[in-house]
Amino acid sequence: MATSIFLSHPFSPLLSRKHHKIPSPKQTIAIAYHSTNKPTTKTPFLPLPTSFFPFPSNPRKEFWPISVGRTQTDEKDEILVVGEDSAEFELSKQKISSWVYFTGILGVVLYVLNVVWIDNSTGFGKSFIDSVSSISDSPEIVMLSLTLIFAIVHSGLASLRDKGEELIGERAFRVLFAGVSLPLAVSTIVYFINHRYDGAQLWQLNSVAGIHELVWISNFISFFFLYPSTFNLLEVAAVDKPKMHLWETGIMRITRHPQLVGQVIWCLAHTLWIGNSVAVAASVGLIGHHLFGAWNGDRRLAIRYGEAFEVVKNRTSIIPFAAILDGRQKLPEDYYKEFIRLPYLSITALTLGAYFLHPIMQAASYRLHW
């Protein structure tokens, strides 16, 4: 219901030379806008600022990086990647001290979260749940209310990110953002776990052959979409200075808003399995929040990156595989290498671990009596 570096690792082969990256839209590069159906000519190009990027209205057209004195034919196989390479992780560039800081920060955050919010004897979590529950006796209304509160705070702070970072700095704003969002997220998740079988039963498909396998596979896939924006854990914990990234490779080639797609898959799978009105209410709230987040995310990226974002937007899609099917997104031959990386392997391990730890997670939620 959540600094690009590259992994030089035997299980994560280097991307081919097709993958060029421009880390900032403010940099200048030499480019040519060329149709794949026209003959090439040998023409020198002077560097142009990326703010002058033309972005294609014809899906058959591509951006190629061109150097002065080289022909377009020389570079026709090299498609410029304007955004960043998602899930990039280079083990050799990691600092042990950074991960020591991360571990320490994680421990402090969990301790404070437990004392200030989760522990019923000292925290405010139960009081918050009781206050929201007083709105209605309907668990569906409470579920929607909790989701709405989280959505307003989470998306509201995200919208204020640029101004907030100007006022207090990137790291301080990340601490504020996480410090407010995390308790609300925990409350919403715990309430859902504790009340997921309340409400009216609409259908019962648990005993239908193949449903369990379908739900399990769907949930497994959903996590590969849900968490691409948290690949750099050091930024999440503000050990590294947090950045607003313009990702373009990996899962982004399939959909520009993987969190939205992952949340839809997760909600449909859980609603199919549980089959009651509380699950429907939770799904409506979460999907609605992520639909707004997709629109708001595009708006914020357009403000931050300008024409560079328009280039990425034009050759990606919100609906999975749409840009690939209509020819706007051309997958490289070694596309699979963009997934054979440590972050994706970590997601695989964590997803499997979360599945087997479901009984422990549920027992912990029940003990809170939220």
Image: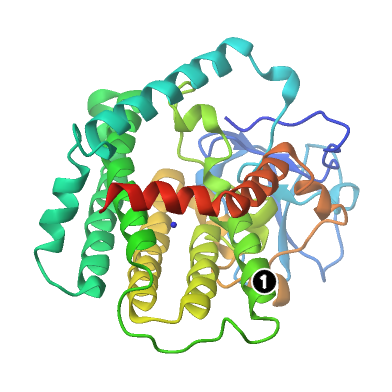
Q: Is residue 54 left or right of residue 85?
A: left
Quick check: can you spot residue 29? Answer: yes
Q: Is residue 87 left or right of residue 180?
A: right
Quick check: can you spot residue 45? Answer: no
Percent across and percent down for residue 213 are: 69, 73
Report which quarter residue 242 is drawn in.
top left
Percent across and percent down for residue 206 are: 57, 81
Q: Is residue 188 left or right of residue 167?
A: right
Residue drawn at x 58%, y 60% as measured from the top left: 55
Percent across and percent down for residue 345 are: 73, 43
Residue drawn at x 78%, y 38% as measured from the top left: 67
Task: Check the image and name the residue furthest to the top.
Answer: 97
Residue drawn at x 44%, y 28% as measured from the top left: 237
- In the figure, 368 relative to 96: above or below? below
Residue type at numbered disc 1: Phe
Report which quarter residue 168 is drawn in.
top left
Query: Which quadrant holds the N terminus?
Result: bottom left
Colour convention: rainbow
- In the figure, 234 relative to 262: above or below? above
Percent across and percent down for residue 24 are: 54, 35
Residue placed most toward the observer, 38 or 193: 193
Residue placed most toward the observer, 31 or 292: 292
Residue placed most toward the observer, 268 or 9: 268
Residue placed most toward the observer, 41 or 176: 176
Q: Label 1: how many residues lie within 10 Å, few (<14), some (14-19) or many (20+)? A: some
Q: Which residue is mark 1?
A: 321
- In the figure, 194 relative to 247: above or below? below
Report which quarter residue 4 is drawn in.
top right
- In the figure, 51 relative to 143: above or below? above
**Label 1: element kind:** loop
Query: Which quadrant holds the C terminus?
Result: bottom left
